[in-house]
Amino acid sequence: MLPREERPLIRAEAIGRTFGGETLTAVFEDVWFDVQRGEFVVLIGHSGCGKTTILNILAGLDAPSAGVVLVDEREIDGPSLDRAVIFQSHALMPWMSVQANVAFAVHSRWPKWPREKVKAHVQKFIDLVGLTGSEKKKPVQLSGGMKQRVGIARALSIEPKMLLMDKPFSALDALTRGTLQDEVLRICQATNQTVFMITHDVDEAILLADRIVLMTNGPRAKIAEIVVNTMPRERTRHDMHKHPHYYRIRNHIIEFLVDRSKAFDQEIATRGYDPKHPPLVSPGLAEPVLAASQPISIAALRAGGGDQIPSRRQG
Amino acid sequence: MASGRGLRAAILSLLLLALFVGAWQLATGGGAGAAADVDPEYAKLIGKEAASGGKSAMPSPADVVKKIWNHVVDPFYDRGTNDKGIGIQLAYSIARVLGGYLLAALFAIPLGFLIGMSPLVYRALDPFIQVLKPISPLAWMPLALYTIKDSSTSSVFVIFICSVWPMLINTAFGVASVRKEWLNVARTLEVGPLRKAFTVILPAAAPTIMTGMRISIGIAWLVIVAAEMLVGGTGIGYFVWNEWNNLSIANIITAILLIGLVGMLLDQLLARLARAVTYPE
């Protein structure tokens, strides 16, 4: 057996989740993946494939109908301070100041800490996300980007083993989103933070992720492939597109989301599929065979122009 | 612009008041001429004053102002059971209202928490609440008098029973509709149930709870007058009834005005408290 440090921090084994009373529908089934220590894993897929449900299961807010999720070889039973969540809607308490919102988390983590120590610790993380000077403000006085910064500070302040991010930047405007992505990249690389994030945004996935998990459309969604990001880790939003791997990875993912995610069942009917070991692909290294054999559709080009994949908004 | 409108509204209010007082003066001042036509037998029977109508029992605005002034300069005199200053009577009423109201808050807010957090408890208690809520609080009075055997405590009980429902229902509603994401934050931070109740659910539900408390204080102040008319002894309600027996309409009008003023102050106080716990989103 591998030494502890080399074993994955998170391992999802054959998890599935069904919803509904009499007519049970499986949103996803037989999903296997892992997250290594210090790794940034992004899960991407269309609305309705159960992305948020998977994140909630990792957070302990929801339980799988089948299978288990292991953290450090122990099965998840409920939420834990070891796994901090950054919510899509920032989820700040509107009656608390920025300072109090972060202190609420710090106090939860270390209830015995004296007031001064909590305050200093809180300040450290408010400074880290660049909100120095706004400590006494209420969330309503902050812009969307600043609110999400508080959400990030709150999650980081408890020094979790892993961060779970639920489309953290999707409610922000493009400019703010870019700045925040850069900062998250900087913070996560500096602290070697383990992160699991879900997103709709292909560029965001390529910028942040070490591995990108592609999910097919629901119901009965499954992991189609895991894309290895072969670009160097020291990338920035600014010069990422100049790297030769960038467009190959991007085209591969967009093509998957536009065409293959719908018709994945037909695809595997001919070539077989092992849910326990979904194919690990590195489209950045060479021209992908699939993309070369057929012209990219108009829809793919159009999706390539914007940041967001055309899809239904999730409720 | 806004201040201009405020000034004009104030002028209009004053005009309306002047119009009302003027009409009142005309209506009460013009009844002097009819004295001659009264049958002397009838006059002997019911008393000269009343029969002649020369001086109507309905006071003029000036009489009422004079009466109010008398009360204002000496609100707390005590000359026996049936002659206490209006300040003392108001104090009795306010004390009863606050007593019953605070007891109701102590009972309704924790129970409302329980109902709001547990769908099971909600379902179990709902039929009782539905039946008990529409009962006129005064209908409880005989039962209260029989079991408690003290008229003052009985009126406190009546206040309790009438102010409990809005607080209970609003607390339960407020607690049940706390945003799920805030509860999820508390869950992922492994916040204990007691800390969660006080630091997340209570502040989140506080505006709704305060709305219920504001409705309650209004109802309690409405009910106390009727309750004190029934049980007698002390209080502003008893004062009104006593002055009716004395046929002192000026005193009754004074009391009515004061009841309105105190009711407004109580409402403003609760509105201010509600504003203090409201959070903008």
Image (tube, grey):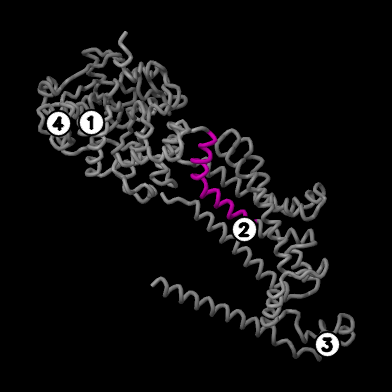
Look at label 1 and name its amino acid: Leu
Q: Check if mark 3's residue and mark 2's residue have beta carbons within 8 Å.
A: no
Name the chain under label 3: B
Please, what is the three-letter code of the amino acid marked with disc 3? Val
Give the number of the mark in front: 1 or 4.
Answer: 1
Dots 2 and 1 on the same chain = no
Q: Give a yes or no on whether discs 1 and 3 share a subunit.
A: no
For the residues labelled 3 and 4, say whether their Cβ atoms are less than 8 Å apart: no
Percent x, y of residue A253:
19, 27
Distance of label 3 from label 2 (alpha carbons): 47 Å
Please say whether residue A105 is one of the residues in the magenta stretch: no
Q: What is the crowding at mark 2: few (fewer than 14 residues within 10 Å), some, or many (at least 20)?
A: some
Residue B70's place in the image compared with B34, above or below, is above
Amino acid type of the residue that numbered disc 2 sits on in the rendered structure: Gly
Q: Secondary structure at mark 1?
A: helix
Residue marked by disc 2: B218
Residue A208: mark:
1
Give the label, 2 or 1, closer to the camera: 1
Q: Amino acid at mark 4?
A: Ser
Residue B213 x, y percent position in the rendering: 59, 52
> Between A172 and A84, which is closer to the camera in this rendering?
A84
Disc 1 to disc 4, how far (Cα)?
26 Å
Label 4: which secondary element: loop
Q: Is residue B215 one of those drawn in magenta?
A: yes
| Residue linked to disc 3 | B38
Pointers 3 and 2 within a single chain:
yes
Q: Which mark is residue A297?
A: 4
